[in-house]
Amino acid sequence: MAVALIVATFVLGWLAPLGASAESPAAASAAGAVVGRIDAGAAHSCGIRSDGTLACWGADSDGQQTPPSGVFTSVTSGFRHSCALRTTGTVACWGLDNNDQASPPTGAFVALSAGFGHTCGIRSSGRVGCWGADLAGQSSPPSGVFIAVAAGYANTCGVRVNGAIACWGGDSEGQSSPPSGGFTAVAVGDAHACGIRTTGAVTCWGDNTASQAAPPAGTFTAVTAGPLDTCALRASGTIACWGDNTYGQRNAPSGTFTAVTLGDLHACAVRTTGTTTCWGEADEDRTTPPAGSLQVLTVGAGNESSCGVAANGTLDCWGSPTDPVVTGAPTGYFTAVSGGLGGHACAVRSNRRVICWGTNTAGQATAPSGTFAAVSVGSSHTCALRPAGTIACWGSATQGKTNAPAGGFRVVSAGATASCAVAASGDLDCWGSSSGGQSTPPAGAFRSVSVGSGFACAVRASGSLACWGADGSGQASPPSGSYVAVSAGRDHACAVSGTGVVRCWGATGYGKATPPGDRFLAVDAGANHTCGLRVDGTARCWGRNHLGQTTVPGWLV
């Protein structure tokens, strides 16, 4: 079943964060499908290619253009250093290390932000950890659980799970004195900061000598700050910039985009086609990105259909030509899609609104208004995460399926008759039917959870798997080992290891539990078939194909 996650992987410009896709926090459907990442440093930039590897360009005085090998899920660039998250959640850094800003601690993280001489990240527990320069206290975060973090020149800001912003470090211009209210994203520049409120409006504070803290009106989905300038992505996909324009860094190109990031004197953005464009100071080739796409798609398997979001944000569904999920697929630009065991699907648009289609007998395809970070489709109900971490469920209320608990959460998954969520603390909370024990989760700290039909599985903070509930086909008896994602289907489940290997267990009919030997970033188990996102950004499905549900369209392979 599809999983909805708040991953909070804000990738940052030099002194500036950015929601890497058109939504912040970043959301992943399936079992952690990844959206492309790009980030600008002082005079260099880095991005994640469609195969998960890193590409950097621009200045190379301290080895900024020499990233490590491997597969990564997000990247952040600071003054002269960069850091990236591996699929295992561990951090790798390179470049200038005079203050240990490129010497990360051990452990698993879900978000990173590189500043001038320090770096901060959100651990899997939701706590913030920082390393590097700390003369102004910029690497001494407060306690509590956060969903986003942004490292600047001499201060850092973060969004707490309740939406409030907390800042620490230098406050010479009021940059560490944020306004009250609820926010979904924050960006920190030299001596100013900006945040996106839950309404979508941008509010800035701190130094305003170049009008960098005077944002335009409108609804925005991502924001990024440079030393004396700011850019944001409108809900329409266009870019608005304000502040200093000495090198033309405020002159954003026309068109629609899924990400934007500001460096010192330049900016880069990812178009909806998946290509990258940069503008501003061109010295040291900082505005000359590598060819190719820096985005990958998301993919999800449902009952007798499958859906995918391509690198350009468009959506396609395939399977039975009479399936309402296939015939009713919406147009537009999206960041995630989720299909369940019933006959409906839901997707998150680039403006963070949720749209559902297909069977709607119990209201399961009637999404509420407001913005969401992620969505997860069950059988006759649907659940979604709001940007602040609260859960909204709709559809059939029988057995308490829509009685979501209060509080802040990072992951939610809707199953056939029950749902589960991972709290900001890492604890599991489940509700709905418990006829098979699927609503009685084990204790401990977890990264993610996925609910199937009568059973559920989760990835512990250690990377090991735990499953509970119905086990008639062995679907609640997971293999040993370390994993980064898991997906529970009708009576089988699959998980992705840190090396990209997929392992499946439970019912084996139609070959749905026999994955190909490719390397994957994500996997989604449906009723009788499974789909996965390969590290090269293409989709592959296996299992029952009587309606074409495993025949991926040519433009997604």
Image: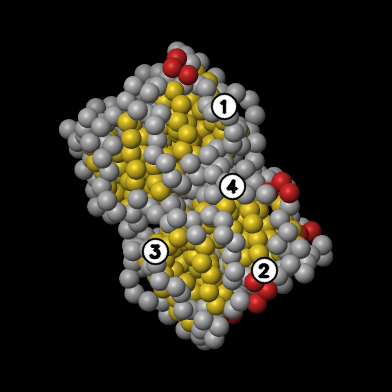
Structural crowding at the residue carrying mark 4, measured as other residues with C-alpha within 10 Å and reported as few (<14), some (14–19) or many (≥20) = many
Considering only order in the chain, which callout, 1 or 2, is on the residue closer to the N terminus?
1
As drawn, 432 above or below 57 = below
User: Which residue is the site of mark 4?
Assistant: 537
Residue, far top: 246
Discs 2, 4 touching: Cβ within 8 Å: no
Say what amino acid the circle numbered 2 marks: Gly
The quarter in which the N terminus is drawn is: bottom right
Discs 4, 3 touching: Cβ within 8 Å: no
Q: Which residue is drawn at the image coordinates 27% and 43% (left, top)?
A: 104
Query: Element at badge 1?
Result: strand
The quadrant in which residue 227 appears is top left
Considering only order in the chain, which callout, 1 or 4, is on the residue closer to the N terminus?
1
- Image coordinates of residue 121 in percent, x first then y, are 33, 46
Considering only order in the chain, which callout, 3 or 2, is on the residue closer to the N terminus?
3
Q: Which residue is drawn at the image coordinates 34% and 43% (left, top)?
A: 92
Say what amino acid the circle numbered 1 marks: Thr
Query: Element at badge 3?
Result: loop
User: Which residue is the site of mark 2?
Assistant: 543
Structural crowding at the residue carrying mark 1, measured as other residues with C-alpha within 10 Å and reported as few (<14), some (14–19) or many (≥20) = some
As drawn, 9 above or below 472 = above
Say what amino acid the circle numbered 4 marks: Gly
User: Which residue is the site of mark 1?
Assistant: 277
- Image coordinates of residue 178 in percent, x first then y, are 33, 38
Q: Cα distance, mark 2 to mark 1?
A: 39 Å
Query: Element at badge 2?
Result: strand
Residue 205 falls left or right of residue 306: left
Structural crowding at the residue carrying mark 2, measured as other residues with C-alpha within 10 Å and reported as few (<14), some (14–19) or many (≥20) = many
**Which circle marks residue 482 in the picture?**
3
Considering only order in the chain, which callout, 4 or 2, is on the residue closer to the N terminus?
4
Foreground: 118 or 60?
Answer: 60
